[in-house]
Each structure stands twice: as C-alpha cells, then as structure tokens.
Amino acid sequence: MDSFYDKAKAVQTLEQLIAERTEAASSPQMYRMDSEATEKFNLSIRREVSDTASRLTQCNEDTGEAEEATVAIQGIICGAKLPPFETWSSRPEDAKRLAHSRQSVTLTGLGSQSFEHIVENCRRAYSMFSRYTPNARLVPSPEFLGRQRVGGSDDTDEYSTITASNRFFTPSKQAAGLTVVDINSELDPRGILEKVDKTKWLHTEDNAVDYYVLSTGDNGSRHLPTAPIVFQIGDLVELQASLICIPNKGNFTVKLILRSMILLNSELTTQATTARTLIGPAATPVLRRLKRRNPSHGSAPYPRIDANNNDKSASVAVDAVVDIAEDADTDNSGRDECMDN
C-alpha cells in the first residue's frame, strides 16, 4: 500500500463492512466473540481421546454432534502467500520445502477500532485454551497476532495484524480418516505440487481452502467461487478460520487455520492501480555530445568539406586532401619495395 492507496477510505469502509457482516451473521464472528455468542452458537473447546489437538467446536442443532467451528474475521490484506505456484527447482532441499508449503494471508485494520476489537477477542479466545492444555503449558503470546509497518518507507506507524494459514499437505501418518482431494489447476496450473512424494504427503480435505467473491444484486448477495490469484494487497476480505491448539516444542500453541476467504471490496486497490497508470514516464535526460577539435587550428573545430560545393576554396581543400592521400600511397609503395629487397 503506497501513497496511491486511500488508507482513510479503507478504514472507513472496513468499519462499515464489519458492522454489516456481524449484524446479519448466522455464524460465529470474532468481533462478537463473547459469552453471549458462546451460548448462542453452542461453542466449546474439545479434544478427542485419539487426538493431540484441542479445537473450538460448535454443536450441530440437527444432529447434536460437535463439529469444528469456524469464526469470521474481517480485515484488509497486507500480506499474502497464495497459489498458484509459478516456479520450481529440482534441488532435493527445495522439494522438501515444497511439502511444507502453506497458503496464508495477513490482515490489518490500518488503525480501525473495530479491527482492534477483533484482535482483543482473538487474545481472549486464545487464553481460553490454557484451561484445556496440560499444566496450562500454553505459549504466552499467540503467534498469529503481530504488528507490522504497512505502506512506504515514510510510514512510521505499526498496525495490528492477524495471520491465518493452512498447509498444503498432511503427513500420511496423520491423514487417517481424512479424504484425499485433488489439487485443481487454478491452484497449481504447472503441476508443481505434483512433485511432492505422495507416499509421504497427502492433500486432504483438511488442507483445502475455498475462495469466493461477494456478488450483490437485486436478489441479494451471493458468494461466488473464484481463484486465489484475484486477491491483492489492499483488498477488504473476510476469513473463515478455525482455532486448533497443538503441541509445540514441549508446550502448546494455538493455530488460526484458514478455511475460506471472501473478497468483500476491491474498489480501493483498483483505484490505486488506475492512479499509478496516470503518472507519466520520467523525462529522459538529453545527452550533450562533445565537439571535435582540430589540433592544427588551435581551438577551432575541424572544417567540413563539401565536395559538391562550387566554391573555389572548397575545391582547393579537396585537392589538398587528394594530394596528401597520393603522397601516402607513394610512401607506402616505397616501403613495400624496400621490404621486397
């Protein structure tokens, strides 16, 4: 986000979108993650006996069974690592790194008070997991929260950020009970992810991330499927993410797992891109060439001789040049004769 991006307008638009999305929501919203929402959506933290991770879950009203809950988070994209992949290296170490690749997105509010409220609720949700970890061994600070300087080098303000991600592959040893799904061509048009050893790594339903764009019309709004390539820095989006607490180097940490992303507003990025195209190209400096000087005439430049000129002085000058050339030929022929002798 540079000087062409209207940050003030982005904050104003984000405030409006958060209010609209949370008011009409029928699913958990991080902006309203409080005791009332916990009761309304039957939220709780559970850990299966066979699972090392505890999860935020939601009770299905129809079946009465606990399901993984997803929470909506609105913000402005300030960082993203999304497919498709365009480069590939055959080096073994790069192949190993590819197996650990993730698709991730980082959101900010550029100082929005509503976004700051979402950040505080993320901290509260994080602290809830400490009661469900052995000996409360939860890493003190959530790794998915941070601060980042957004914009050009002249921007000294740091803003709160939230990062959600999801790995592309699950180790085959951990994929029991998960359905293996194909990676579509929009995510991997060059088949780079196919280079991963499928006997060790699997792309499952738990690794899938859905991408949508909000479409509004006379019949209301709809979420239309789209490709991840359309998302850009500065877009206003809504994430759907789940919270999972997993072991981490002797302790426990909570991951914010990216499940889907919806493009809510792209007008500001489009306007910024248009503004950049209106900037004219920089003027090319005119190079000054040095004049050639005639050492036989002091500082005067070499006289130009026009052979087609009828002027007598010009004719004499041409004859002088011809005589000099003939004398040079005579000298050269003399040298050649000496060499022959």
Image (cartoon, grey):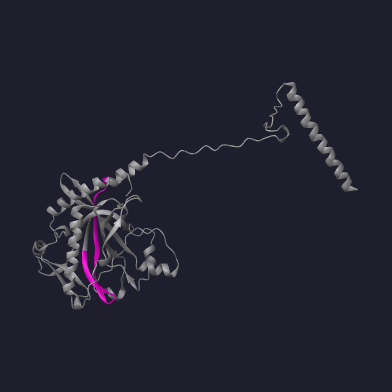
Q: Position of residue 34 (x, y in %)?
A: 12, 62
Is 290 inside the magenta-drawn segment? no
Nearest to the observer: residue 5 or residue 216: 5
**Residue 265 position within the rendered picture, expressed as x and y whole percent measured from the top left:** 24, 48
Q: Residue at x 30, y 67 (%)?
A: 203
Relative image position of residue 273 (x, y in whole percent): 33, 44
Q: Which residues are drawn in magenta?
A: 242-267
Left or right? Give the position of 68 relative to 285. left
Frontmost residue, 20 versus 151? 151
Comparing 233 with 146, the one in front is 146
Q: Residue at x 16, y 57 (%)?
A: 31
Classify 195 as above or below 293: below
Question: On screen, 47 above or below 319?
Answer: below
Farthest residue in the right direction? 341
Q: Quadrant of residue 61?
A: bottom left
Mark count: 0
Residue 256 located within the stretch drawn in magenta: yes
Where residue 209 sits in the image (x, y, percent)?
A: 26, 61
- Residue located 28% across and 59% down the image: 147
Which image quadrant for residue 174? bottom left
Main SS of residues in magenta: strand
Q: In the image shown, does 281 or 81 lie closer to the viewer?
A: 281
